[in-house]
Image (tube, grey):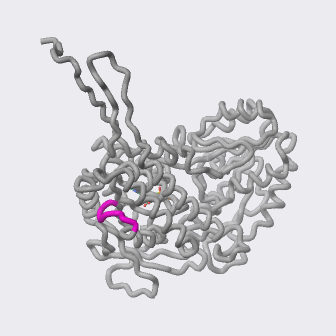
Amino acid sequence: MTSTARESGKARKSTAARYQMFIDGRFVDSEGGKTFEVFDPSTEEAIATVPAGTAADIDLAARAATRAFYDGWRSVTAQERGRVLLRLAERVRARRAELAELETRNTGKPIAESEYDMDDTATCFEYYGGLATKINGEVLPVPADAVAFAMREPMGVAGQIIPWNYPLMMAAWKIGPALAAGCTVVLKPAEQTPLSILELAKDFEAVGIPPGVVNIVTGDGPGAGAPLVSHPSVRKIAFTGSAEIGKTIMRSAADQLKRVSLELGGKSPNIFFSDADFENAVDGALFGTFINQGEVCSAGSRVLVQRDIYQKFVEAATAKAKTIKLGPGMDRDNKMGPLVSAEQRDRVAEYLEVGRGEAKVAVGGGKPKQFDKGWYIEPTIFYDVDNSARIAQEEIFGPVMSVIPFKDEAEAIRIANETPYGLAAAVWTRDIFKAFRVVKALEAGIVWVNHMQPTFVEAPWGGYKASGFGRELGHWGVEEYLETKQVFINLDEKPIGWY
Ligand code: ADP
Ligand code: MG
């Protein structure tokens, strides 16, 4: 277990809220009875204990999901599956304030960002509630004497593993399309942030999710995540997290030729040409990097700036970064909260050390002095960064921007693509020809023009290259949970074979 999820053992007494996990329609402890603590990153205090799930719990959940799939869910009408998701969305909207507060207490993020997350969560369930009735097959134009068509069928039990940066929203991105497709689910939230989905699970029965259709098993990666990946009844793994664990999961899934979709990290370029609207550009650089404390897979943390505005840009971004108010997310004045865990804070602090040896510091570069509690890191801008530097190549997952100068369009494209990753990118310019040329040249799954980060549930999300494969959201999202069955119907009463 990590430092933020220490095993606290069976007998430990705690004043923190006691959560159970959700298996086969009931809230239960883990088989072994062990628990771990989860924390408020702004106070460093434990706010809850949660069961430490093991292979035995995963097995119970996978069996429940298997029964629920074969005994019912796959035959529930698409209309009813859609209505279930719409009712779930209504519950998220009704509980918006409460769930947002819980999300902020558990992740540290500003409350306004958690409120946006709750809206996006509800919108995602609504989208897939609507899509459930639009999953169509195709009739195919084969030669005469036959009819051939393609049917879409649910894969079965989906194992879903999610990260800690957008806890409830990531759960919605996974559960929404799976249920729309007719799959059942075993979801393992991140060990740092399991609370919001466990809260929402209290409404599963009321909205009509039958027992076993969605199971939530809490625990850490080796203890609960790995057995989920290797469970023989689980047909597909959907994972969002680090590239390192993505590779581990892919290797493990290979043993059973299990379907895998991976949304991994990035080191996304945010490209600023000198003809961009300057004020918007500076704002966009900060927003693209520092939203959610920089704990964003699509963070635009490689800021590429054209040389003729480079100096002015670094100065303006620095001045603005100094005005970002840090503090507990529950205080609406604060625009940046602490990082999710001591472990993550330390990981980012190590990169700041690395960065000081590789580039120049414009602002930040350490732990802020004004707090005696809380896992804070100052919003940090490094400049004169070489694209081969570690702070330009490795995902930091914290409020750290690396600014790199470029001469012209060709150089910008070359630098932008010189990374193993390919999740996202953005280009800022008022020249529409240039914008489209750069969009076409970038190797990334999401490309913004004159903005960075907003995304809508209708549009596909996922990466090129080492950022993974498969797409979430939109109609692409539901494809990840569907098999395709070809059906051939012979119309020739005396069909001819070879023998
Ligand atoms: P981070 O290190 O930033 O927490 P990870 O990629 O390790 O990112 O974690 C993302 C998710 O993957 C979490 O839910 C975590 O528990 C899970 N996880 C970690 N290790 C494994 C593993 N070996 N197998 C399956 N899931 C894992
Ligand atoms: Mg990890």
Residue 62: give x, y in percent of width and height.
Answer: 27, 58
Report the magenta stretch's main SS: loop
Q: Is 157 on the left or on the right of 244, as rendered? A: left
Q: The magenta stretch spans which residues?
A: 207-213
Between residue 398 and residue 446, name the one nearer to us: 446
Residue 97, placed above or below residue 466:
below
Where's the N terminus, which quadrant? bottom left
Seen at 31% across and 72% down, the residue is 26
Residue 237: give x, y in percent of width and height.
Answer: 37, 49
Between residue 463 and residue 26, name the one nearer to us: 26
Magenta stretch: residue 211 in it?
Answer: yes
Seen at 80% across and 65% down, the residue is 322
Seen at 34% across and 69% down, the residue is 22
Between residue 192 and residue 148, name the one nearer to us: 148
Residue 226, placed above or below residue 269:
below
- The quarter holding residue 140 reads top left
Q: Is 343 on the left or on the right of 159, as rendered? A: right
Q: Is 203 on the left or on the right of 232, as rendered? A: right
Where's the C terminus, which quadrant? top left
Residue 323: give x, y in percent of width and height.
Answer: 80, 66
Seen at 31% across and 63% down, the residue is 210
- The quarter holding residue 207 reads bottom left
Q: Can residue 341 be seen from the camera position used here?
A: no
